[in-house]
Amino acid sequence: MQRFEGRTAVVTGGAGQIGAATAARLASEGARVLVVDRDEAGVAAAVEAIEHDGGVAAGCVADLLEDDAIARYAREGAELGGGRIDAFFNNAGVEGVVAPVEEYPVEEFDRVMAINVRAVFLGLQAVLPHMRRGGAIVNTASLAGVTGAPGIVGYVAAKHAVVGITRTAAVETGRRGIRVNAVCPGPIAGRMISSLEEGWGGGARDSLVAAIPTGRYGAVEEVAALVAFLLAEEAGHCNGATYVVDGGQSAS
């Protein structure tokens, strides 16, 4: 199915596992994809993988702590799309350290908020002027954006903020024909959850899996499939919502 034929997508955090999987999924369905990340080698690898499979992609190395870099990727995405951006996966984020609230480093809290909230907000500001009716945006929140979690106060606060930004933007842009939703992954197999497991200490993985009704971590491809649906025209009445990908963890 070529749901994105003739359409242009921008994916931030595109060198990360969820970002790269989603960029590849969108390209496989016909999108021209701009892969954005500060990891130059990771950007090159993601673009190469898409092109190897017959897709069309370009890379943009950008540190989202720099406002100019955010404006630049929006311009490059519009140039790739002949003047417009049709789909935006506003995905870049970091988990931060694991520490209790009273010990959580202020500088780390500020860094997590800058990347996970400020850069998401600025990404919307930069991309929306290049979008037309029929455009769609998905912000990456987290299960930690709708529940609490010990030891990661910066991440939890940031992802709750992303949910609020998503709802506000959706209300503002809906009448312009632009939809904004958020995905909220639970534990997804990969680097980030491995980092958090290490911070939480021994037994963390067993405890996390035991709390998931499906009995396993999610896969990046499962998140990518949901993002692709939300960015596609068939999700035309999905707007301002948060969609969990957690195997039923939040329901139990």
Image (cartoon, rainbow, N blue to C red):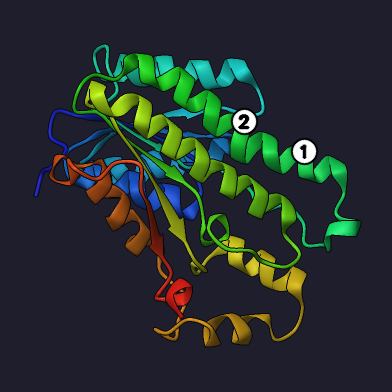
Assess whether mark 2 and mark 1 are in contact (beta carbons under 8 angstroms).
Answer: no
Name the element at disc 1.
Answer: helix
Instruction: Place residue 117 in its image quadrant.
Output: top right
Residue 49: x, y in percent?
A: 34, 47
Quick one: label 1 or label 2, which is nearer the N terminus?
1
Residue 42: x, y in percent?
A: 51, 43
Q: Is residue 77 left or right of residue 125?
A: left
**Residue 182 or residue 194, whichever sits in front:** 182
Q: Work out how far the residue at label 1 is from the one at label 2, CA to CA, in angstroms.
A: 10 Å
Residue furthest left in the image: 1
Q: Residue at x 36, y 31 (%)?
A: 171
Instruction: Kindly tell me whether residue 53 is visible in this rendering.
Output: no
The residue at which mark 2 appears reads as: 118
Residue 94: x, y in percent?
A: 63, 48
**Residue 212 or residue 251, whichever sits in front:** 251
The residue at which mark 1 appears reads as: 110
Residue 40: x, y in percent?
A: 56, 35
Name the element at disc 2.
Answer: helix
Q: Residue at x 25, y 21 (%)?
A: 176
**Residue 56 or residue 196, whichever sits in front:** 196
